Image: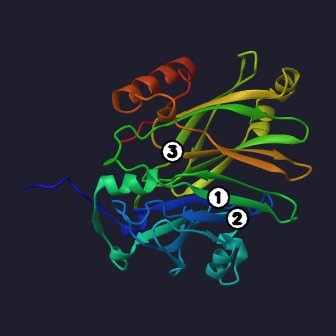
Amino acid sequence: MVGPPTLEFDPRFVRTCTFATLHTPGYGSRVTLFNGVRPGETFATPFTVSMSAFDRDGIYLGESGPLLHLEPGAATKVDVDEILRGMANGDDDRLRDVLGILHLVPDRWLGRETCEVLPAELMAHMLATDDFVEYYSYRGDVVTGVAYQTGPMNDSRLSSTRTTTIQAPKVIVSDRVDTIFLLMNTSTSLDYDNEVELRFQIFAPTGESLVTSAISVPAFTFRLLSTRSVLEEAGALERFRELGGCGTLFGLAANGTVVPLSMTRNDASGAIAVDHTLPPMYYVSTWGGEMRKQGNARLAEALFADVPEQVAG
């Protein structure tokens, strides 16, 4: 009897948590990891955790040794800044603003370069788990964070469409407040090298489109998109403020997937609120496959017909 098909995987990417450090804006980072498949459940396994880091150009900076052991159902907080300091060997600038990946490796695959894993096991660990990424001000008076999942991304074996759709009705810009989008480009293999281009528009509450532009995110790194800077460069900042200073960002990437987080930041106090933008599958039950392609085509036609696109190969 033939069982369900398995996928060949680097064990370090079976279960991951991807995050960005924000040292330059003035924040340290901690991550709370949760082994959400509990004892006795299908695919329950203990994990051994390590961490990799990539610089602003997506260059691999190395991997830590084993950091901790996480039993099924357990949760723990990791001070990723402390780990990065240990990896930097005194060169703090080298690891100042990085994309980090925490690798939760099932114990049975420790030390192996590849493993055979069922897609159902990948999904079980992702869907049962939210990790909490926490940012704290170096001044000591601000702590914030967001819970989200970073499952297997930009892997053609798991998705034929590999796109990003952002509908974020929370662009707030004033003299003191900016809304910044954090965009992370990650995958299931260190050989991944696709640069994802996100096309976007910013709308005022009136429905008036004030900016149409694009941003590229290289593989295994992140970019910060300041909506205040984008509006200012387009000569639309004053108009946006005149219309109330609140708006919406729509974004579409046709050649890959990025993890989008939005951050509303007060420049004066350093207070920052972080949120994720839910993908359409959370509010469109039939999203995926042909429906996803049709939805992306409609969005591209309506908003980005004049902006060239790149398409995933």
Contact, mark 2 vs mark 1 (Cβ under 8 Å): yes
Occupied quadrant, residue 291: top left
Where residue 206 sits: x, y (%)? 75, 15
Where residue 57 sits: x, y (%)? 59, 60
Q: Could you say which is closer to the camera, residue 267 or residue 239?
A: 267
What is the number of the mark on residue 29?
Answer: 2
Q: Inspect the image, locate mark 2, and give the three-letter code of the amino acid beneath it.
A: Ser
Q: Inspect the image, locate mark 3, and give the three-letter code of the amino acid beneath it.
A: Val
Where residue 249 sits: x, y (%)? 66, 30
Q: Could you say which is closer to the camera, residue 43 or residue 223?
A: 43
Taking the spot 64% from the left edge, 75% from the top edge, the residue there is 84
- Quadrant where the N terminus lies? bottom left
Taking the spot 72% from the left edge, 16% from the top edge, the residue there is 208
Q: CA distance from mark 2 to mark 3?
A: 25 Å
Crowd class of label 1 (few under 14; some 14 to 19; many from 20; radius 10 Å)? many
Q: CA distance from mark 3 to mark 1?
A: 23 Å
Crowd class of label 2 (few under 14; some 14 to 19; many from 20; radius 10 Å)? many
Q: Would you name the residue on which mark 1 appears?
A: 133
What is the number of the mark on residue 31?
Answer: none
Occupied quadrant, residue 238: top right
Q: Would you name the residue on which mark 3 appears?
A: 196
